[in-house]
Amino acid sequence: MHIDDQKLIQVGLAVLEIEARAILSMAENVKGDFAKACRYLLKCSGRIVVTGMGKSGHIGKKIAATFASTGTPAFFMHAGEASHGDLGMITAHDVLLALSNSGETDEILRILPLLKRRGIPLIALSAPNSTLARNAEVHLDVSVHQEADPLGLAPTASTTAALAMGDALAMALLEARGFTAEDFALSHPGGRLGRRLLVRIEDVMHQGTDIPMVSSDATLSEALVEMTKKRLGMTTVVGDIETRNLLGIFTDGDLRRALDDRLHLHSTRIEQIMTKGCKTVTANVLATEALHLMERHRINALPVLDKDDKLIGALNVHDLLRAGVL
């Protein structure tokens, strides 16, 4: 069978439009029952057990993984294996989240009496007026008017809708728990994103004699020597080398402006031309925060201060690049 490129594109666009409409149509279902489901999940002192069969099972695995990686302990239990021993993985402290497009999946319905007997709350993502919906403490309607499959047989829009509702639950819980980027990094230490979020300023900053630093009575010439030696594109300016009380910073940009003004290298004091009130960071903040600060203010280097505002380090954008933050 021959099909031209334009027809392939038309089919692809039609699928995306159908699935987009399916997700948008669920907005009217995110009301009181959605909040009620979130309350059950937030009160859960155990884990969220997600279950499903077939394509719904595959979606359930992803939802469980999203919960687990965003601060809500969860795992997936195959509905078919549940009645063959896996039901023992569920404790009285857990909540079951069951996915079934029709709400009539035999493998799930078979375990409902046992869940009721043990007092385990059930949240159902399914079609309304189904057996699963009627037996759930909370039901969330994820039914769709049309599958993206031209035959209307393959789960497409319906699985997309269920996945989106699972994401909506997970993100609502994330917000309620005050889950942070650092929390996310702690559960993703092996990935590039996790490494980026775990790196702190103290891990990448230059310390000790590697800090570019001159006293306020230094000349422009002396500041240039220090900048050249330390290679950070700047030097910090302190009132006293021993106490390291930061007064300002002198950068490549300041140097260009000084040359434009034809200032004398050996007689101009650095305190006359330094940038006062410069941006700084502390050693314990995430390196990504320093990156955002640099991007927001269009700067390339930062002094690092301790809790007493003493200069203890310095870094530039290249240090963040080498650390994998960029």
Image (cartoon, rainbow, N blue to C red):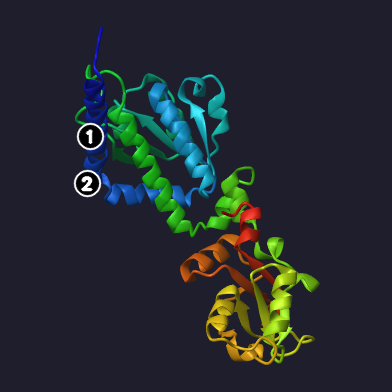
Q: Amino acid at mark 1?
A: Glu
Confirm whether residue 122 shows in the render. Answer: yes
Q: Is residue 194 above or below residue 247?
A: above
Residue lying at 53% horizontally and 19% vertically, measured from the top left: 84
- How many callouts does the rendering have? 2
Q: Earlier in the sequence, mark 1 or mark 2?
A: 1
| Image location (x, y in percent) of residue 174 | 46, 53
| Image location (x, y in percent) of residue 141 | 27, 37
| Image location (x, y in percent) of residue 239 | 70, 90
Decide which of 286, 30 is in the foreground and name it.
286
**Callout 1: SS:** helix
In this figure, which residue is indicated by the disc labeled 1? Answer: 17
Residue lying at 48% horizontally and 43% vertically, measured from the top left: 67
Q: Is residue 96 above or below residue 252?
A: above
Q: Is residue 207 left or right of residue 293?
A: right
Residue lying at 73% horizontally and 83% vertically, measured from the top left: 222
Q: Amino acid at mark 2?
A: Glu
Q: Is residue 13 above or below residue 278?
A: above
**Callout 2: SS:** helix
Q: Is residue 25 left or right of residue 96?
A: left
Residue 132, image quadrant: top left
Point out which mark residue 28 bears: 2
Decide which of 110, 247 is in the foreground and name it.
247
